[in-house]
Amino acid sequence: MQSYWKVKLSIFLNYFVFAILLNSVGTVILQVQRTYGVSETSASVLEAFKDLTIAAVSFIVASYINRLGYKRAMLIALGGNALICFLMPTIHSFGMTKLLFAVAGAGFALIKVSVYGTIGLVTADKKEHISLMNFIESFFMIGILTGYFIFTSFMDESTPTAWLNVYYMLGGIALVAFLLLLTTPLDESSLKVDSSKPVFEDFAEMLRLVILPLVLVFVICAFTYVLIEQSIMSWLPTFNNKVLKLPATLSIQMASLLAIATALGRFLAGVVLKRLNWMVVLVGCLVISAGLVLIALPLAEGVDTSAVTGWGNAPVAAFIFPMIGLFLAPIYPAINSLILSSLPVKQHGIMSGLIVIFSALGGTTGSLITGYVFEHYGGQTAFYFSLLPISILTVALFFFSRLQGSNSSVDISGAGAGH
């Protein structure tokens, strides 16, 4: 039990580090526009450098993760990101920023696949699985929240590049996480890797898994959810700055409300989902999320923020819109847990890879669309766009519920049919 506690502490810290690195993209999108003078559309490619790398590395690693080992994969990720963070303040440019997010994306692919796989090794049943999943995802949101304040503490209006020094701190945290994991034992014997089996058979197993109806509908749900979440999270600092006309530092700090709301939503979900039907909870959350969009965005029209000096006199819209995170929060960890707990432990690594791949593609798609609409049609139109994927996700969840209800377990070792 003591070793499980240490393993859980280790994966919490790993997730915390990458939460700050990856989800600083919204802050960095705003900062590179100000520091390097790039446009909204150009800045939006940072999401692609992050997410497309996550997708590509996840595709390569997902079928190979059992051979590589969860612990070894996480150590590679932490070491690589510690190095790039230490280099960033010295060799800074928009190009270097792209490289940073590419390395962070590759590292997160290794971390997330490994963390999701490790959860199956250290939990006893479905209830414990979904509870730990929600708690870890909540901790991820705490990392995001911390990141907003860490970044703004390094910002200095008189020195445009001062914010880059934050990467020395992030490199240090990654190094601490590396050393903790290095000294943490993890029993991976249950993965039972057959080293004589060709690697292409692992890829074939992953492809057999993704064509199952249950998994296919899950993939649509995961893709659409992350499209919604990332389009809002990555562009909220810019929305606050360019639509609500808040100062840059305050824009970033107030975007932290979204992370606070999401973290709180996932903590509460761990309690609520033990008592209520998950389908009722998730659809209810989506309906309320759509309502918040329709309430908050009209309040952002024609707001006079010329006298805004801080949180105390910020416009109401800056407080209401981030509350969408409270209701979107339970969806992602819940559907991930449902699909993973339908599979044998040895297949969790492969399924985790698919989760990461399609989540990354959803994140990139959401940010690129939002960036384009933001530049050409305005920030309010860009955020109204979220109503479309919210509607699609609601419909997809109904199909997922029906399929999940008829598949108490999934077996892909043979023909690939669920039973």
Image (cartoon, rainbow, N blue to C red):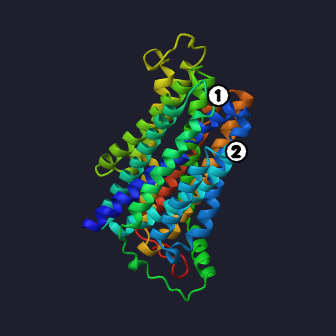
Residue 276 percent location from the top left of the image: 32, 48
Quadrant the N terminus occupies: bottom left
Q: Horizontal and vertical percent for residue 331? A: 45, 48
Q: Which residue is mark 2?
A: 45
Dot 1 amino acid type: Gly
Which residue is at 69% across, 26% downward? Answer: 378
Q: Which residue is mark 1?
A: 379
Mark 2 or 1, which is nearer the eye?
A: 2
Res 214 visible: no
- Between 209 and 65, the one nearer to me in the picture: 65
Q: Among all residues in the image, which is located at the extreme front?
A: 90
Between the residue at mark 2 and the residue at mark 1, the CA separation in whole angstroms equals 17 Å
Task: Give the amino acid type for the residue marked by disc 2 in the picture.
Answer: Val
Quadrant containing the C terminus in the rendered view: bottom left
Q: Is residue 139 left or right of residue 89?
A: left
Q: Viewed as shown, does residue 81 lie left or right of 33?
A: left
